[in-house]
Image: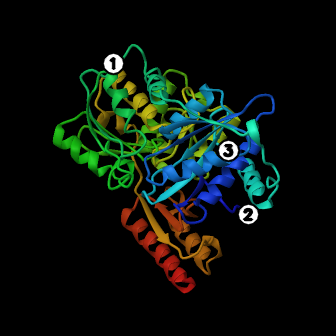
Amino acid sequence: MRRLFGTDGVRGTANIYPMTTDIAMQIGRAIAFKLKDSRHKSRIVIGKDTRLSGYMIENALAAGICSMGVNILLVGPLPTPGIAFITSSMRADAGVVISASHNPFQDNGIKIFSSDGFKLPDADEIEIEDLIFSQKMAALRPVADEVGRAARIDDARGRYIVFLKNTFPPQYTLEGLHIVLDCAHGATYGVAPHVFEELGARVSAIGVSPDGTNINDNCGALHPELISAKVREAGADIGIALDGDGDRLIVADEKGNIVDGDHIMAICAADLMARRKLRKKTLVATVMSNLGLERAMRKIGGRLLRTQVGDRYVVEEMRRNGYNLGGEQSGHLVFFDHNTTGDGILAALQLLAVMIKKGKPLGEIARIMTTVPQILKNVRTPVKIMPEKINGFADLVAGAGKKLGNSGRILVRPSGTEPIIRVMVEGEDHDLICRMADELCHHLSRHCRDLA
C-alpha cells in the first residue's frame, strides 16, 4: 500500500499532511540516502513552479538532503521537463520538482527524477516510503564537513531555452506566425515567450505575471477557452496553452477551435511515419485517449498501444519496448528523440514544425483525426474507494458496455491525485453516452453520500 506517492509523486494541500515541511524534509533525507553515489560527493537538483508554498517546501527538502551529506543545486522556478533536462545534463544524481502541476495554488507536490532524467519507478518510490516510515535513517547523521551544501544555477533558464530551440528544425523559422501564448502564471513564464520570440514568432503572451496564488487560475491548459477567445480576437495563427509546471500542452487553431493532446499526437505521429521515424510504427497513449486516435493510426498504417492513466506509465512502456512518441489526451506529450518526459514547449515546437513544413493552417492539419463523442465526468468522494467495490456498479457498467458494443468504450477509475472517481463514456451516439454517464455518476454519487 502506498502512503505518500500517487501516480505523479506526492501531492496534497500545502502545510497539511502529506505536504508538510516535516514530511518534505524526510523525503529529502530518503532521496539523498537512496540515490547518492559513494564514488563522489553527490548532487541533487531542486526546482519548483511559482506557488507561494514552494519556498517552504524547497527549504525543507534542501535541509533534509543536506543533512544526509548530499549537495543541492537550486534552479528556482523552472518547468518540470527543464529540471529533468538540467538533472541529466549536469550529471546530477537526482532531480526534485516542487509542483502540483495543474492543481490550484493551495496544493503542492514533490516529483523525483533519477540521474538519467526519468521519473522514479513505482518500486523506488515505495522504497523511499519505507525509508521514511521505518526509521531506518534515524541514526544516520553526517557531521562537520560531511554535511551537504547548496549552490544556485543562475543560468538554468538560459540553458533550457537553448536546449528547446535546438529541438526545432534548423531549416525552419517562426517568422510570420502570430502566437497567443498562455503560461498559466506558472513555471514557463520566464522561458516560453523567449523560445518562440527568438525563433522569430510574434508572441502575445498572457499568464506571465505569477504572484504565488494565481497559477492555473482560470488560465493555461486547463482553461483553453481563454486562448481560444484570444486567438479569434487577435486573428492569430495558433494559441498555445501550458499548465503550471509546463509538462502539458493544449492548443487552439486559427479559428479558435481547441486541439487536444490526441490530435497533436495524431499529427506528429503521421509526420514521423511519413519520415520513417516513428519507431515500430507505434504511438503509445493511455486508456483515456479517444477511439478516433486509434482509427487515425490504423489509417496511416500505424498502431496505438494503450497504457494505464499517467504519463509515467506511457514513458515506462516507451522505454521498455523502444518507442519514441507517446502521451495523453490531457496534453502530456513525450518525444523521446528530444527529452525524457512530457514537455509542453517542446511539443508545441514539434507541432509548429509540421505546420511550417506542410504550409497549412493547424485547423486543416488537425482533420487527420475525427473525434468520437466522449463524455468525461467526475464524482467527488469523501474517502478513497475503488469503483468496482460499490454494490451493483459493475453490473451497471457491464450492461452499458453491452449496449455500446465495439463502437464505444466505458472507463471508470479513481484519480491518482485527487479524491475523485473519473467516468468516461465514448460512442457514436452522443445522447446515449450522455445518459449512460449520468446514470453511472448518479449511482456513484448516491453510494458516496452513504459513506459521508
Q: Residue at x 82, y 53 (%)?
A: 139
Choose mark 2 or mark 3, whichever is in front: 3
Q: Quadrant of residue 84?
A: top right
Question: Label 2 sits on what residue type?
Answer: Met
| Residue behind mark 1 | 173
Q: Is residue 41 left or right of residue 168?
A: right
Between the C-alphas of marks 2 and 3, the distance is 25 Å
Residue 38: in sight, yes or no? yes
**Mark 2 or mark 3: whose residue is earlier in sequence:** 2
Q: Quadrant of residue 331?
A: top left
Question: Label 3 sits on what residue type?
Answer: Ile
| Residue behind mark 3 | 65
| Residue behind mark 2 | 1
Residue 324: in sight, yes or no? no
Looking at the rendered structure, the secondary structure element under dot 2 is loop
Q: Residue at x 46, y 67 (%)?
A: 378
Question: Label 1 sits on what residue type?
Answer: Thr
Q: Quadrant of the C terminus?
A: bottom right
Looking at the rendered structure, the secondary structure element under dot 1 is loop
Q: Which mark is residue 395?
A: none
Q: Residue 393: give x, y in percent of width and height.
A: 58, 76
Choose mark 2 or mark 1, whichever is in front: 2
Q: Residue 151: give x, y in percent of width and height.
A: 58, 33
**Mark 2 or mark 1: whose residue is earlier in sequence:** 2
Q: Residue 405: give x, y in percent of width and height.
A: 53, 61
Looking at the rendered structure, the secondary structure element under dot 3 is helix
Q: Is residue 242 above or below residue 382?
A: above
Instruction: Sort mark 1 into few (<14), some (14-19) or many (20+) by Cα contacts within 10 Å.
Output: some
